[in-house]
Amino acid sequence: MDATTVIAVICSVAVFAGWLVLPHSATTVQPVAVSEERKPVAISA
Amino acid sequence: MKIDSGDTAWVLASAALVMLMTPALGFFYGGLVRRKNVLSTIMHSFFILCLISVQWVLWGYSLAFGPDKFHLIGGLEWVGLNNVGFTPNPDYAPTIPHQAFMVFQMMFAVITPALISGAFAERQRFKAFVLFSLLWATFVYDPIAHWVWGAGGWLHQLGALDFAGGTVVHISSGVSALVAALVLGRRIGFGKQKAEPHDATMTVLGAALLWFGWFGFNAGSALGAGALATSAFVVTNTATAMAALTWMTVSWWHKKQPSVIGAAAGAVAGLVAITPASGFVNVMGAIVIGFGAGVVCYLAIQLRERIHVDDALDVWAVHGIGGTWGALATGLFATVAINSAAANGFFYGNPKQVLIQLVAIGAAWGWSIAGTFVILKVVNLFVPLRVHEDEEILGLDLSQHGEPAYASINAN
């Protein structure tokens, strides 16, 4: 195994193993309320 | 010299793939800006596709690839494609028509100034952008392309390795973007109000199309349909994927969420970094290069934010730093087992290659900084670089082009 392969394996392990310790889910986000319906517009010339 | 139909077909198809990258870049950038500036941002890329296509056949190709003058620039013998016909040119691509090589290189010249447009998005006057792009392509891109790729170019003779444009395309555009951001100054409200991307889906679509087109960029640079093109294709995909995974992981750790835009930006960083190395490294080298791109480009953005430089779409961090990392990594991981016509890098017994790569990196940074600064100052003598404050607040879509991107939604 050459040096490039060793470094590549270390990099891959760092990324894949990193996922084990990352947060499980996003922070709680409040749903965004839609204030009003968009009004249709005329596209024709 | 005999024309090889397979090689010609692949290079022409690659030219079409690379052509697609410029409008794809427009979508990538377009999604990242505010709603009121999306059309102007897309227009930057679309307009440059037209502008440089004409500049290239008139004089750009001759300056970049024409007969060498003092190892610095091509001569004017090929202006208007004079002497650029269908017979292969042995200096560049001995198995395809000379014009096939010319049009493939044209697409590189097109996308490079388009990359810079991300730095001055949302505030540059369109007329100033037109003048800047034409001058920059002529006085910055064409000379650097000649140094690195032109027959007789000084970096080419020095032995600098740049398979598909890490130095020529990405360092030049990324570093110039930083200069442009500093000269133009910050957008109104920068640092006080957040300029959220108006359409992340557009950005991800743009990144995916860039990834697709980049197979032409890198694998096409083999200038033939064979083993080297196959290797370039494989390492391009590998590094891109690894960079996206790495960026996403780093940002997940840093910001506590796996960012979608981050994954897209990471993929682009990987594409940038593998570009100079794509014809010289094996797949293990590609994994390291992708990993490095995901880390260093992400850190470069944190630095850029900390020093309050308004490079609006992070062209410097992704292209300037990603290109620099890629050029340096080429000197580390290049191996003649992939490309017997090249050289080994540091890890294959040739530490000198790292020094050569550093010279090329330094030259590209220096010329890009000086050239871009002078060009911006010259343009500013004739046309103000920035729009008026009220035009910037209104948005460039309406103030520069008189057209809203989305007729049904209030601009903001």
Image (cartoon, rainbow, N blue to C red):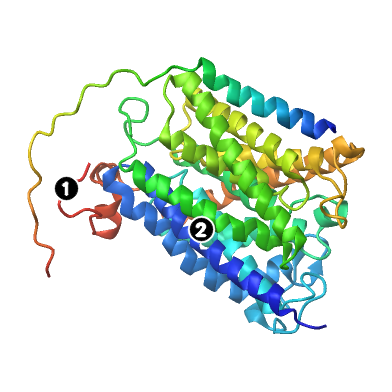
Residue at point 64% right, 42% down? B239
Q: Is residue B275 visible?
A: no
A35 relative position to A13: left or right: left
The N terminus of chain B lies in which quarter of the figure? bottom right
The answer to which quarter of the image holds residue B244 is top right
Q: What residue is pinned by disc 2? A: B21
Q: What residue is pinned by disc 1? A: B409
Q: Position of residue B50 (x, y in %)?
A: 47, 69
Q: On residue B197, which mark appears?
A: none
Residue at point 70% right, 84% down? B86
Same chain for mark 1 and mark 2? The answer is yes
Disc 2 residue type?
Answer: Met
Q: Nearer the viewer, mark 1 or mark 2?
A: 2
Q: Is residue B265 visible?
A: yes
Q: Chain of mark 1?
A: B
Disc 1 residue type?
Answer: Ile
Please tell me whether residue B146 is drawn above or below residue B178 in the rendered image: below
Q: Residues within 10 Å of mark 1 (few under 14, many from 20)?
A: some
